[in-house]
Amino acid sequence: MNKTSRPRALERCRQLARTWLRGLRLRLRHSLAAAAAALCAGLAQAAPVDSLTLLVPDGVDLQHWSIKVWVDSAAEEGLNIELMTDSQLLALGTGAARAVPGLIVPDSAHLRASDALIAAIKQYAYTGGKLMLVYDAGVLDTSGFFPTGGRPSRFADMVGLDYALWNDGAGAETMVGFGPVVGTRARLDSLSMPPGKYLPYQPPASLATTTASTAFVPVTAADPGGSARLRGLLQQRQMARIDEGSGNVRKRRLNQLRQQLGLGVELGAPVKFNRRNPQAFRARDRHIYDLLRRNSFEVDAVINADGRSATERSVNEGAAGDGSLQTISGYGYGALNYFSYVTTGTFPGTVYLSSPEHGLAAGIRTYGSGQLLFVNMPLGYFKAVGTDGALLHGFLDHFGRDVVGLPSMSVQPRGRGGLIYNWHIDDGDDLTADTKQLLAETSILKRGPFSLHFTAGPDVISFGDGKGQDLDNDKTAQDLVRKLGNVGPYASPLNRDRLPAHELGSHGGWVHDYWGANASEANVPDLSWMLQRNFDAIERITGRRITEYSSPQGNTPTWAVRWLEARGVKAMYMVSDLGAAMIRPWRNGQRLTDKAWSSPVTPLGKYATFEEFEEFGVSDMASGQWLLDLQSFAINHRTNRMFYTHPPGTLGHLQPFEALLNRADRMQASGRFRWYTMSHLADFSQRRVETEWSARMFFGLTTFTATNAQGLTEQTWLLPKSRYTMPVVVSGAGSVRADGKDWLVTAEGGTSLKFTTLRY
């Protein structure tokens, strides 16, 4: 190469190098842009970090009760929930576990499933997902058939037990069992079952397999879980009249209501008796491995020997009976029977609940790198059709907060637990004798506020007996109601005898027992006038709009619920959904209200009032300890529960109330407890479910935003400290505090709030 040609060659080389570098930079820019686009698309498609996901069939009616009851209940528990169709889950492929924090496959809505969907659900859990599989989900194929050839449910290998043992039709009468559901006291507490919603389990002498003494629910391919067959029984259970009335009312009857109704015995259950399956998993014997520890920040108290005071004790001292077996119970019935698939084999996980004769009722296990919570009972059906929602709410809360670790909105203002004390003032003596004496001689009604409900008519048992309050005419009765409500001459804030802001309510239909015995679903004869007169009488003498209600004998027909909401009632006492916090009531597959809330009774096992305790031998020491335990439960779970009494029952058993109220004073002073009225919590709860909030995460930095045009004051978010660093409010008015388990972010005003935190 000569000297002249070398510069040309060098220049040509430089040109080629520049062209190659330009191409490289262009390719890198394109690759980076494609990677960024893929990342953004992935972030956009991923489920929000604050939500559970409910799997629903393609094309399903999203307003059907089997789906809506889950969505409503999650909102009532303060959990966000998203809907995902089968096709959307299949499209996520191996990325489902990364995209979906917690997946629920519900009962009743998802009976049919393809083999591909079954495989996708298993893959989700195996690759790290948190899965809650409920009862009859996926027991049929897409054509509506059980597995053939004696095979169990296609989920059996994942669950670790065989169930849905159709056996080509030979198992139709023995694959679903019927009986009590048992768990340890600690486990029931973790599932939000309050003290009094369960009783000590009394095991049978033997679990016989040689005699036809075990109850089963016959099934068909059209009714693969037995739900349709048992619908009538569950509806009868939730419609039963239970509330006996006050001691004064009971004395006026010829016989007791419970004698008339035969409560405690579920007659005519559409079950069949057969021999117990000898291979049924003996889940009852595995509760000893369900070891739960109480949190050190929880409170506990024991009633003292004097019966009128209480002493705080460490949670370890109170934990002695946490491993004792208890059975879920109901007011008026005692131990309740539920239905579940018979399970065979040995469960490779922790047994939560058992059906002593039939196997596993609920349990959790590790599956691959994920977790499976299997609930072998139709939770959605129990609430939507059977009006028994405590189990659904308990499992939703446990799965969302404890298993998945999601943030949630507290069901309580400022996250402060408390009780609703509902008074049923049934007749004239209840008001002008017993309530008057309680006002004069005790400080009970100087505590609170409480929810005080009146039956205002002139009669009690039947028309013309003249034993009612007669609020239209009786001056003494009128004066007492005004005093209790701080209205009229008692309205001045300078009044030394001014009471707390008790909420006044209507206790039914004018004549206590006539309403209880005659109000019906058909409303024949039309008794709406009795509701109207009761409201009018109380409103006339108080000048106050009445927004609370309770029914005599617990008899609240569907038409009455809707009449009450149309009149402006915000909250009502119910003897269904027993043991639950305030919720929106369902019945027969329909939600009964738009914005009115139910305040379910929490009983002490089979009984709930002090008149009943006295009659059936429940001592003041036992009832007093129950009230203290219920109070501790509300504080520790940051929740609410309602108990009720009548004035003569309270007056005749003052010591348990002294213990409760004195402790309440101390707990209120420390900011850990407060009394609530039904209306207060209904207003708060409605604002809470109408609040829109979400969380978005970018490389661990999580931003929460919340809005509500009606205001956010006292709305509170709970963030598990195990998952999040201390939050910082970046806009809006808010405060941050902590307990041993959660960060609590509370809105102090305004209509919007934003706060940030780092997620582990």
Image: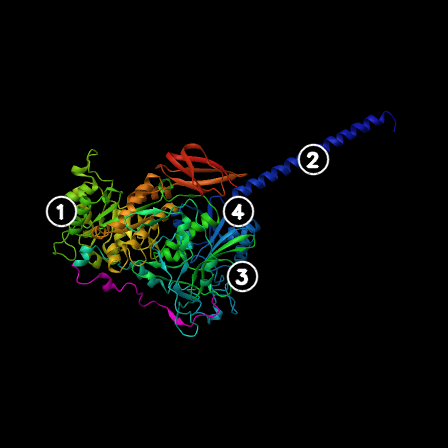
Other-residue count near label 2 (Cα within 10 Å), few / some / many at <14 / 14–19 / ≥20? few
What residue occupies the far front of the structure in this picture?
305
The residues colored magenta run 252-280
Other-residue count near label 4 (Cα within 10 Å), few / some / many at <14 / 14–19 / ≥20? some
| Amino acid beneath label 1 | Asp
Give the dominant element type of the magenta stretch: helix, strand or loop: loop
Q: Earlier in the sequence, mark 2 or mark 1?
A: 2
Give the left or right position of residue 33, taking residue 394 as reference: right
The residue under label 4 is: 99
Other-residue count near label 3 (Cα within 10 Å), few / some / many at <14 / 14–19 / ≥20? few
* Res. 494 image quadrant: top left
Picture quarter with the N terminus:
top right
Q: Secondary structure at mark 3?
A: helix
Magenta span contains residue 274 = yes
- Residue 662 visible, this angle: yes
**In this view, the mark in front (3 or 2):** 3
Distance Cα–Cα, label 3 vs label 1: 68 Å
| x and y percentages locating residue 360 in the rendered image | 46, 62
| x and y percentages locating residue 287 in the rendered image | 45, 59
Distance Cα–Cα, label 2 vs label 1: 93 Å
Residues at marks 3 and 2 touching, judged by CB atoms closer than 8 Å: no
Distance Cα–Cα, label 4 vs label 2: 34 Å
| x and y percentages locating residue 229 in the rendered image | 37, 65
The residue under label 2 is: 24
Specify how the rendered protein is coloured. Answer: rainbow
| Amino acid beneath label 4 | Ala
Q: Earlier in the sequence, mark 3 or mark 1?
A: 3
| Amino acid beneath label 3 | Asp
Residues at marks 4 and 3 touching, judged by CB atoms closer than 8 Å: no
The residue under label 3 is: 157
Distance Cα–Cα, label 4 vs label 1: 63 Å
The residue under label 1 is: 472
